[in-house]
Amino acid sequence: MLFASARTAATQGSSSARSCATLHAVTRELYISVDVEPDGHVPGTSSIVSLGACAAAVRDDAGAIEAFDPEQHTFYAVLRPITDGYVEKALRVTGFDRAALERDGRAPEEALPAFAAWIDGLAAEHDAQPVLAAYPLGFVWHFTQYYLHEYAGRSPFGQSAHYDMKTAYAALAGSAVRDAIKRRMPSALLGPKDSKTHHALDDAKGHVDLLVGLLRWQRP
């Protein structure tokens, strides 16, 4: 019985070690900071007015985070509306005029395949799986995924490769999710580039310091 108990304990210890090894196995990931400025609350009944993204960081095979200059690799598009409906207040926040968007905005059928190709190119260059990072994720994710699937026919992020800076901060700082707001975060974590100008590319670049800080905070 003692032998059996020792063998069981050894087996459990070995299993635990394997589990820990599995937990700490690392896939190379490319984090892309994305922001959207829509003219409403949900995709399908409203449109993305502008979409901005920048390459933010790579997690390498050892788990180290390499941060990028957010000016280095960027994507930005002002899009033609896809619906007749919109929320006047939301459109006003974007700073764009509806008539100008209908006249001068890029067709989603052209812009979204270009966005997907841009992501693919960066992922190949860095030999890493792309991850969409946003603050807050839910709002950006459902617009971005809808547009990618509807107009590019696919999403390079798949169905679950996403990182929510708001939830990550709440988990790491031990705060409630609703309290994970920027005015309650340390200024050093937000970094000097943090902004909320409602310009999609400016805001995507402004979130890079926060994203990198959170990614490094999680390291053992």
Image (spheres, rainbow, N blue to C red):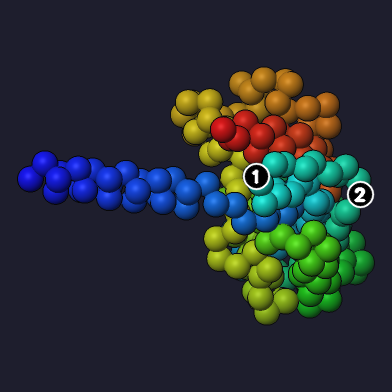
Residue, disc 1: 63
Corner quadrant of residue 217: top right
Tell whether 133 sits left or right of 22: right
The quadrant the N terminus occupies is: top left
Q: In this view, does 218 lie to the left or right of 111?
A: left
Taking 29 as reference, is 204 above or below it?
A: above
Q: Where is residue 155 in the image (x, y as percent from the top left)?
A: 66, 70
Q: Name the residue under label 2.
A: 72
Q: What amino acid type should be assigned to the residue bearing mark 2?
A: Gln
Percent coordinates x, y for residue 174 in the rendering = 48, 26
Q: Do the residues labelled 1 and 2 touch (CB within 8 Å)?
A: no
Under mark 1, the amino acid is: Gly
Q: Identify the secondary structure beneath mark 1.
A: loop
Q: How crowded is mark 2: few (under 14 residues within 10 Å), some or many (20 or more)?
A: few
From the viewer's perspective, is residue 117 above or below residue 167? below
In this rendered view, identify the residue nearer to me: 26 or 210.
26
Foreground disc of the pair 1, 2: 1
Q: Residue at x 91, y 49 (%)?
A: 72
Image quadrant in which the C terminus is located: top right
The first of marks 1 and 2 along the sequence is 1
Residue sitting at the far left: 1
